[in-house]
Structure formats: structure tokens, C-alpha cells
Amino acid sequence: MISGILKDRRSALIVLIIIAIVAMSLISPYFLQINNLLTLLQYSAVVGVLALGQVMVILGGGGGIDLSIGSTMSLSSVVFGLAAVNYGLSPWIAAVIALVAGAGFGTINGLLITMLNLPPLIVTLGTMYLYSSLAQVLAGGVDITGFDREGFRTIGQMSVAGVPFQVLCILLPLGAVMAFVTRRTAFGRNVYAVGSNDVAARLAGVPVTRTRISLYAISGGTAALGAVITASWLLNAKSTAGVGLELQAITIAVLGGAAITGGIGRISGTLLALVLVAVLNNGLQLAGVGSTYQIGLLGAVLIISMLVRARGQSKTLVA
Amino acid sequence: MKKITGAAALIIAGAVTLAACSNTPTSTTGSPDQTGSGSSDVKVAFVSQVEGIPYFNGFKTGGERAAADLSITYTQTGPAKADSTEQVKILDGLVSQQYDAIAVSPLDPTSINSSLSAAASAGVKIATSDADAPESERAVFVSQASDEALGSTVMDELAKAMDGTGQFGIVSGSADTATFNNWIAAAQAQQEAEYPDMELVGGIRYTTDTAQALQEAQNLMTAFPDLKGIIAVPSTAIPGVAQAVQNGDAIGRVAVTGFGSPQTSGEFLESGAMTSTVLWDVEDLGYLTVWALNQLVTETPFEATNEVPGLDQPVSYDEATKTLLLGEPTVFTKDNYADYDF
Amino acid sequence: MSAPAMTSPSTTPSPEAPDPSSAAQRDARLLSILRWIQQLLMPVLLVVEVILFTVLSPHFMTAQNWTNIAINSADLALIAAGLTLIVIMAGIDVSTGFAVGLIGWFVATGMADQRSPILVLLTALLAGAVLGLFNGLLTVRLAIPSIVATLGTSAIFQTLLFALWNSTDVFARPVFPWLSGQSRIAGFPTVALLVIVVYLILHVVLSRTVYGRSVYAIGSNAEAAALTGIKIGRVRLTAYLILGLLIGLAACLYSARIGVVQASSGGELTMLVISSVVVGGTSILGGEGSVLRTLGGLVFIAVLRNGVVLAGVPSLWNGVMIGVVILLAVGINGLVVRVSRRQRRSLT
Amino acid sequence: MTQPVLEAKDISKRFGATQALDGVSFRIDASERVAVMGENGAGKSTLMKVFAGVHQADSGTLTLKGEPFTPNSPYEAILSGISTVYQEPAFFSHLSVLENLYMGRQRSTIGWLNTPAMRREGQELLGRLALPGKLLRRLMGELSLAEQQLVLIARAVAADAQVLILDEPTSILTDTESERLFTVVDELTADGVGVCFITHRFDELERMADRYVVLRDGKLVGETTDADRDGLLAMMGGRELAPNAAMSTSVTPDRVGADSGTVDQAASPSQASIGSQTATADHDQVVLRVRGASLESTFDDIDLDVPAGRITGLYGLVGAGRTELALSILGELGLDAGTVEFQGKPYTPAGSRAALTRGIAYLPEDRKTQGLLRHMTVGENLSVAAMSSFTSTGVLELGKERSLVARWIDRMKIKTTGHNAAITSLSGGNQQKVLLARLMATQPKLLILDEPTRGIDVATKAEIHRDIHALAAQGIAVLLISSEMSELLELADVVHTLHEGTMTSTLSGAQITESAVLRGATGSLADAVSTSTVGSESEMGAIS
């Protein structure tokens, strides 16, 4: 039992988070202040939402990965902006449209991958170009501003009992829902079954194709959610909203214990990995270490976490 | 488990090392944490558009000079890439570090607003410098030169090189940077008013990095063989455009000017690939910004004309727009660029 | 062993069932059509593209413009050639761009410090080898999936470049004058000839040597390859080494072409390189592909990027076209696999 | 004939709990042809893989031409002159036949391929196996199974081997193709090469080998030069180890009309415990009726009836189309022609999911790649197909799931620590029971079992056999696909034999005899000469 706990990626993450918090509070006296901790949380919301979508795709196996998640976010952001500004819709309705659109962009990925049996890496590479470029084209390269802001800024800017709204009312509920869905519903069971062995799953009556398509739709939907949060927070719809976020989302998912081969990983692990990354980023920011160094540290964390994993698991012949 | 803890130690050690040797773009004059030795407790900061490019290094030099003169603590930081989201994060981080006054050069005037208001309501004095956020609650905008002056100056420079006639192109930075767009608009207005024989061809080419700027410039020259000049907008585009002219053996045939720091342009001013570059004395801008922040902290109102101790010329203040204006743009050429260290 | 003379084959086991059924024949016909499309897609697209741009812009079909295209994509071409080896073995490398930037910094600094060009070139090659081997060790020896490992190293390379750059743009003159793009041999840009030589060498290596065979064998069936005695680890590491050396060389071209090394130099190359390989038709699942196909994909993308500007299309559209072409190319591959699988009656 | 080319002394090899080889001593002389025989899991393939350097022996010594020989990799073995054609084909489907032939030992000068020479030699090589030379340029993946097999044999032949190991080389070859192979083997032995076969084909024994060696449960139990079928079968059988799984080679239980099992089933606890026994009324009603089923180049015009409460056997050699037929009935593979009726109504196969909801459950042939959800628990593996029984809204009622799983663990006597144990922690036999329970939990009307006991230890095998009996006794229609003769003889009420995609015979009651089944399966209906086999071998258990 104890060895089970120790082997679990999540306990390792908790230890890491504690060490990181101690180290960061030694480095910067401001780190442990309530304000800062809340700020820290606030920034994790967008990338956290994306990582949750990414981890679902990875769990589904079959080389599942979504490189287009950042671009989908940009494109959904533009869809939001166009709906709210050019068509003058209420931002709330525009947000719903953006979510549907995001899920649609994800579904396109899913259909291409499952129907044509294409490698997810390449399909989402293609749509990564496609979506980000479409976002730029549709927006004419600039940000879309001028939608009705009152009320809508709640998502991005208000806080409830001091906790940012986007964390308390979006990220955490989404995490909880996903944790519930993956562990307690037939769909979640299907996801793990498909990720574990898709042939066996199919023969056991699991709808493999439908499950995988849904995962990409979810990933697209979370990207759109990220876009809505960003739009509400910055009060403009950026055509480059998601640039570079795919790397962070993948890193957090893998760091959280999701095996890139599918079938292994927990939502709680992803959330813990998110906290760790947020603590490291924020601490370094406070210590005056530039954000480029944070990117490098993220890369190192990713590789080291894989090393720990690779030791325990059998080596594969093929990359 | 041992391995995981080992890995943890490694990661944290890396982080701490990074933090310890932060000879990184952020720099702090004075000792921020303990000693108040000689300096007062005033802490001011500036958030640049992008970390550590020569331009903002020059800004820092000026800012640090002012901080030393005024005996206050000055910190300058900024995102690694020109990313407005990142900028907002950095600003929020500074607010939670309880700075007394913060100046920002916003990449995007809209998205920074809410953070600026939050900072203002947390009691932090807020200014914009180098670029403005007109709708925000900033107390003052420290302007290097007006957009109009910059735009028309660069157009005059180009027209001079092209004898006021012929085709020219514009290679800009990323499409969503407001300042660039304002300068370009001003330049275009100047051309339409003053140089009817000149013609903008190929539209405005937006680029994200030097390599792309190079390619865009090269393709412009191919598409328009009669092209006589190019305006290159930010410091990332300048080396690309100038290199394209150099690579294409077009020195003397295609004139290049633009908005770039003299050090970035120096190489090309020497080779003749660039005729001039238009900017302002950014060290002075940094100096003025820190001075203004200190004025805000000490709650000293600005006069219509201010004598700033470290600057040669008086600085005018426009009450209506709450803008401090450094002065006219500076034109850097082969002859004078070496005098500037940014 | 002595081989007794055999009579000519008397019985021919026929693979296709002797009684032809319409369904299978239809599949076989569909498959051969798809194979045709697969083979012809890139050449046809290239021709269409060239014709289109020639019509749209009078300046497209000029020697000067083609020279520009060649010079501007030479560094890309070198990396894509190396990456092809990795992709044939079902791997990937997403760190190539920043590796170029990082090595580019050494090159530019070396040249700025007036070091001997030979020394700078050797340094670049050595640095490329080190970075390549580092990626190789992570994926080959430590068994980290190559996409994850190189995502990580890409971030690290980017940060290293940033740290070295330390807020100072480094201006560089070309390592050798012939690397600059100005130099011509018999009217051809020297760098283009260099690229062609590299492609020819790699093509010959892949198709005519034991090493090349091993690369395909590993991509096709790594376990079977191990059974035949191929040293999988060594072959894969060598491929990363080759890629690294080519990146080193490409970094010399890159810094000569751009003339300056900045914080994010090279980053834009990564996805273009992968796109070139994939659009060319090398399968990301391994086992098939060639550098010549990569060259086709590369030319397509380079011409596209050049042509849209000349034709006056805003550069924002670039990504749409590259994305569509990637999806088209892999989509047809997918159809081929799907149909041939249906023929083979396999469950998976 | 005096000097052994390859000699093994006291070779032992253990995989986890399984003693795959136990003190085996063995020799092949120059110019000798040896056939290695034995039942599933007897250790034949493992022994060959020790020779081939795939596995390293735990103890014991190998000598090659008198020199000590310890191959640490397949490559070393090949270099030393041991050339192997594995049972699971290992080739490069993306590469041409020529490239496959020479992979690993290309003709080259300092790394430079000498393609013309290889092409010349390759032509000749293919000619020896009566394959057309134009095959050289084809992609390996496009060839038929038999052609692939022949190319792999050609590949091994070309390797200048001193010892050639062929693991079931003829199982998918036609008679003419096999004869070609034997001719080539004759030539090789004439040159002093030692050849070692693994085979199940008694009809080919004399043509194939000079000496026959029998393995059983990892031990070498006999050696003879007499190709007497009964004698060899007796050695291979050795039933004293597992009386419960008694294989009666000649007696076929005739259970027509009997509701409960005949042999020692009445006392079996599992029979009593699996489900209720109320379904007896449905017995003999045809649950699955297939008419004229055809799938291009796979099977042709198959008629098949599977009645309730009966075990219907389907026998055929590898490649006969048995599994494909099952997959077509499920709808996982297409069906070019023919009709399927299920429970008296027309049924259009539409995939496993649809089949399961209708009551057709399939136990796949390959447990590892088609059955197990490797990263999941015993409970999750067991309940995955029956999730609808404990969810109505999509939210799982875990309490119900737990009791369902507990019930089946108990009924099937699955040895596990429980619901949350990792599926990979179970033995192969218990994994198979979980998979069987997975199907049973869906309460199927028709069970299609594809090699249900492959690679499973004898005791568990007997338990699974009892379970299958009990299921049929409950009224479930069982279609049992097996290449293990003893299994069919023991369990099946009716046996259909498939040969190269056609149904060659349907045997019931006393007609079910080894020779009759084999005649059907080998397509040699006219040839009444005693042909016998013990079924195709797989040692998956040993590998895992």
C-alpha cells in the first residue's frame, strides 16, 4: 500500500510542490503573500484549462496529441471577437458560439485522425498552421476590441472571496468534472480502455472511433474556453491568443503523469503539475528571472520527469 | 521515490541557480531587499515591451542614472517575446511586490487596462512610457516624441533618399502592436500630404522575426524591381531588411530607413545599406520616466514646462492629455550613431 | 554454399486468388489509383503552383527570384534532409530551429571575434554533433518518446540561446564568402549546389548503402530489424548525429543569410522543416520516404512562401496554404493505408 | 554424421512462474534433419529461440562444431551460422523482397551495397523455392502469407547457415510449396547443413526429417527415428500430469441429447455455480445460422449452424480462415456474400459493439494484443463490456460494479487480490478467465471462443474447459475455434473443418475422430493415409 502511494506520480508532485514553495519563499519574500498566491492562481487558469483538454487527448492513446490546441484557442478567440463585435452579439452568446466553434475545430481533428487513420501529430500540425493562420486572416492580423464589456469581465477579472473567478468558477469545476468523468462514467472508462488497447476495447464493445473524436472535440472546447477566459480578462479578442501554449499544455499533461502512449494518467495529476509549473514560473518571475528562462526550466522539468518515468518502464524500441 | 526526489532536487536547484544568477534582463539598482543605505524607501519599476533588446537596455541605462541621482530603487523587466499577456502577468507580479510606482510600455493598450486599474486601486502610481494606453487610469504618459513627429520624420528621411519620387515598401513588426501602426499611419499621412510622387507598393508587410523580415524585403524587391526605398519598423525588422538589401546587391539602389536603435542599425549605416534611422534618445526617455515616477510618488505636480535636472532640454507637459513630451525625434546617421550606446 | 542449378520455376504460387472477385479487384484498382495520386500529388501541385504564380506575377519566373528562393531555403533544406532520416525511423525532432539559432550564435560570435573561418565551421559542426547526440541519447538510450524529448530540448536550446545572446545582437559576416548567397558557380548559387550535393549524398546513402537499408528496416519493423542483427541504437544515434552535423552546417548558412543572431533566431525553422518532410510524403509512422521527396516538399513550401508575396497575397495566408497541403498529403497517405489494409484483412 | 553441428546440454529457461525448458539436451548432426515435436507450450519455440540467441539459457551449455557457443543476440547467432525462420513472421513490409532477403547481411563493399549481385543471387534463390524472380521488386507487405513465408525461408537458406531452424514452415504452404521447400532442404543437408524443424504435420514427417524429438512441459521426453504416429502422440501427450484434462485420442464423448456434461463434469463446482440453469428449454435451437458466407481470398461459401446448448467446434490450420470467419460474423471484417441469421432473424453484422448488444460475444485469439486492457485493473477489464448493466445515465454505479466483478471473480475462481489488482499481475490463465468473465457478464446468447486456452497452463486449461461445458449446459450456444485437437475432441459436439477458406467436413458424434478432423483440415479428404497432428503451436505464455 505504502509503496503504491510512493509510486504514484501525484505524491511525487506534491513533494516537488512543497520543495518548490519553500525554495521560492526563500528566494522572494513576496512569494507567500496572499495577493501573489492569488495572482499565481489566476494565470494558471488558461493554461490549466488547455492542459486538461490535452491530457484527455493523450489518455485516449493511439499517439494522441493535440498540437493545434494553441491555434484552436486563437481561432476561437477570433470567432468570439467577430461574433461580439462585428455582429454585435452579447459577449455571453458570443462565448457560447466560440465554445461550439472550438469543439467543432477539435472535431475536425478527430475526424481526420480516426476516419483516415492519420497520425495525430501530423494532423494537428496541419491544423495548427491552418487554424492560427485563419485566425490571423479573419482578424486581419490585429486584435478585436470593442465588445460590450460590462458583466462579461466577471470571468476574467472578478474574484469570489478573493479567489479569481476563472479559477474558482471555471478551472476547478472543470477539473472536478473531468476527474469525475474520467473515473466515474462509462465515457471515462471508455477513454482509458481505448488508450490502453484500442483493438481489445473495440472487441469489448467500446466505441473507439466515437470516443476518440469526442476527446478531440473536448480538447477543442477547452481551447475555446481558454480563449473566452483570455478575452474576458484582457477585454480584447486576440488573434494570437494561444501562441506557444501547446508546449505548456503538453508539458503539464506529461509532467502530471499522463503517458504519451495513452491509458495512464489522472486529472488530479495534471492539476498538481499545473500548480508546480505555476509556482516555479511565478517564483522565478518574482526573483526577476526572465520568462525565457522559465521556458528552459519547463523543458528541463519535462525531460527529467520523463527520465524518472523511463527508468520504471520498459524501453521501447521505436520512438 | 529516491529518483523522483532526486529529480526534484535537480529541478529546484536549477531554479534557484537561475534565480541566483539573475544577471538577466531584469536589473535592480540599489539593493532592493534589505539596505536602504542612502536611498529612500521609494521603489519604482518599468515594464518594457520585450526583455533586453538594445533599445530597452538604453532605457535602463537612463533609468538607472536617474535612480542614482534621485536615490531611489529602480527595477526594469519585461517579457521575453513581445506578448501582451506576458506583460500583464509581469505587471501584476510587480504590484504584488509593492512597488510605489510603475511605468509600462504597453504592447496592447486595451489588455493592460484592467491590470493598470487594479494597480492604481492598490495604491501604486501608474505611468505609461514609450507607448501609451490612453483609456487607462495612468497618471501620466511619458512620450518620447509624438507619433506624428516620428512618422513624418521617417517619411522625410526616406523621401530625401529617394528624391521624393518612386515606389517604396513598408516592412513592419507584428500586426497587433499599436505603436508601430500609429507610426506607419503618420508616415503614410505625411507621404500623401507632401510626396505625391511616391507610392507605397505591396501593402504593409507584417513580420514576426528578422528572418521573415529578410524574406519579405527580398520578395518586395523582386516583385517591384523599381522599388527605391523601404521603411523598416521595429528593431527586429531592421537587420532583416538591411541584410536583404545587402544580399541583393541593392545598396545605393534601394534606400532603407526606419525606426531602430542606432546600435542595431550601426552595421548597416556603415555599409550604406541604411541611410538613416529615426528614434529618440532612449536613455533620456528612461531618465525622464524614472524622474516622472518619482514625482508621482512624492506627489509633486508637473509644470507646463519642467526643468529635469539630468536632461539638457526642458520637458513640456500637456495637462489635457497628461503627457510629458521628451522632444523631437532624433535622426541617426553614419556620422552620429556611434555616440549612442543603445 | 553450392547452389545446384534449379529448373526454372514450374509452379508459380499466385498471391492473388485465382478467381477474381469484384470487391477485391475494385479495392486493388482503387489502391493503384491512390498510389498514383500519392506519387503524383507533389509534382502536380508543384507544377500548378509554379504556373499559378507565373501568371499572377511577372517577377516570379525570373532567374533572380529562383536564386532568391534557393538561397533563402538552403538552410531549411539541409535540416530537412537530416530530419528525413529520423522520420523514416518513426521519430521526430522539434528542436531543430532553436538548435540552429544556438549554433548560429557561436558562428556569429566566432566570426565577430575574427576567428579563422575553418575553426568556426568546425565549431559549428561540433556543436551540431553535440546537440544532435544529446537528442539522440534522450530518445535512443533513455527511451523518452522523441516528441517529448525534443519539445524539452527545444525549450532548453531556446533558453541557452537567450542566455548567450544576453541582450546583444551579434552581427556576422559569412563564415566563408561562398556561404553568403552572392557566390555563384557557373551561374548557380553555390549554396544551392551545396544543398544538392548533400541531398545526393544522403539519397545515395539511403538507397545504396547498408546503413540506409538499416534505416528503412528500423522504420518498417524495429523488432525484426533487431532480429536481423541491425544495431538499432547505433543506427538511430548516427541519424541524430547526421542531423546534428547538418544543423551545424545550416547554422553557418543561416547566420550568413540573416546576418544577425538574436534571441529567437532559428525558431521559425522548426515547423517549416517538419512540414517539408511531411508534405514531401515521408510517412511519420516510419518505414517509407526519401530525401528526394523531402526536397519536393521543401521546394513546394519555399515556392509557396515566395509566390504568395509576389502575387500580393497577405503573408497571413501562408499558414492556411501550408496547413491545407499537409492535410492533403497525409490524407492521401491515410487513404492508401486504409485501402491496402482492407485488402490485407487485418483487424488493426 | 559423427560430429554434431549444434549440441545443447542441460538447457533450462524460466519465464516468471513458467519453467519453459527444463534440462533439455539436444543435438543436430551435420547433414541431419531433425523434427522437434510437442504440444502447445511444450517449449519447442523457446528451445529454438535459445539457439537463435533470442533467449539466453538460465543454465546449460551450447556447443557449435565443438566450440562453446553463447549467442547473446540473434545477430551473434546468425554470424555463427544459425539461421532461423520464426513462427511469427518478422519482416519489413515497406521494403522490397530483395531488401528483405538481404537485410542484415547485405552484399556490400565498405558499406556500399552491391545491388546487382544481390539481385542476381536473389533471382536464383527465389528460383530454388519456385518463386518468380519478378517478385524481388515487389513490396513484402503486398505478398500473400505463403509467399512471405517462402521469402523468409529463402532468406534463411541464403544465410550460409550451418544450422537452419524452421519453426512451423509449412503450416500455411500448399503441398507443392512444401515439396519445394523439402527439396531445398535436401540440397542443404547434402552440403552438410543441419536442419531443425518444428512441425505438427505428421503426414510430412517422413519426407521432412530423419529423426524426431519430442518435448513435453519443457523436458525432452523422447527421441525416435520411427515416424509412427501413435508412438509419437503417446510421447507428446503424457497425460499422467493432468488427468482432469484427459485427452482421449480416440474416444469422442457423444453427448447428443445430454444436458449435463458427460465425463467428470457433474462434480465440478464451477458448473453448478455459473449462472442459473433455467435455459435448457432453448437447447438445440439454432442461434446462429450462416449461409453462403464468402470473403474474398479468405473464405468461401461457408454454411454454419450453431445451436443453443451445444459446443460447435471449428478446426483448421493457421490461415484457414477460422478467425476471419468469426470476425466477419461480428462485423469487424466485411462479408462479400452470404447471409447471417441470429435467433431466427436476419442479422447484419455491424461490429463488436452491436454484436454484444444483440448477445454475440467474442473471445479474441490473441489475449495480449486483442483482449487485455493492459493499464487497467482486473475489475475494469472484467466489467468493460457490461458497463450498461451498472449505468443508466452514463455515471457508473461503482457499488453495482464491485458486486458484479466480485461475483464473477468468485464464479470463475479467478486467482487475484481483487477488483483493484492490475490485470498484468495475473497469470495468463487467470487473465483469460477475466476475459471470459467479461463476455459472460454481458449475458450472451452466443459465445465465439477463439483459441480459449492458448498458452495457458494445464490446470487452468482444465478449469476453462469445465467452464465452457457449464456454459453450454446453461443453454448458451458456443462456437469453439481451436487448433488444439484434444480440446475439440473433448468439448465439441459438432466439428466443422476449414481448409483454405472452404468448409471441408462437418463431423458429429462418433464421427469426430482425429483422423477425420485432420483429413478435413488438411484438405486431403481423398487421402485416407493416417494423418495426424496436435494442432498449431503457439508459446505466447512462454514469451510473456
Image (spheres, coloured by chain):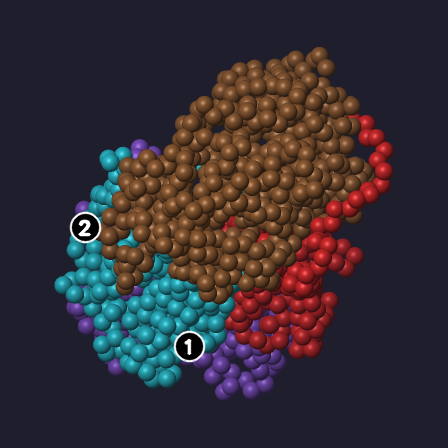
Task: Give residue B182's mark.
Answer: 1
Residue D351 picture location, percent across and down: 47, 59
Q: Colour of chain C?
A: red
Residue B251 picture location, percent across and down: 63, 66
Visible residue check, residue C31: no
Element at badge 2?
loop
Residue density around tag 1, few if under 14, some if 14–19, many if 20 or more, within 10 Å:
some
Answer with the quarter of the image where residue B300 lies: bottom left
Residue D124 horizontal side relative to residue B229, left or right:
right
Answer with the quarter of the image where residue D296 lies: bottom right
Q: In cyan, which chain? A: A
Quick one: quadrant of the N terminus of chain C? top right
Q: What amino acid is found at the position of numbered circle 1 in the picture?
A: Asn
Residues beneath discs 2 and 1 located on the same chain: no
Q: Residue at x 48, y 31 (%)?
A: D247
Q: Colour of chain B?
A: purple
Q: Residue at x 37, y 80 (%)?
A: A83
Q: What amino acid is found at the position of numbered circle 2 in the picture?
A: Leu
Residue situated in front as seen by the camera: C203 or D486: D486
Marks 2 & 1, CB-CB < 8 Å contact: no
Q: Colour of chain D?
A: brown
Residue identifier under label 2 = A32
Q: Residue at x 57, y 17 (%)?
A: D25
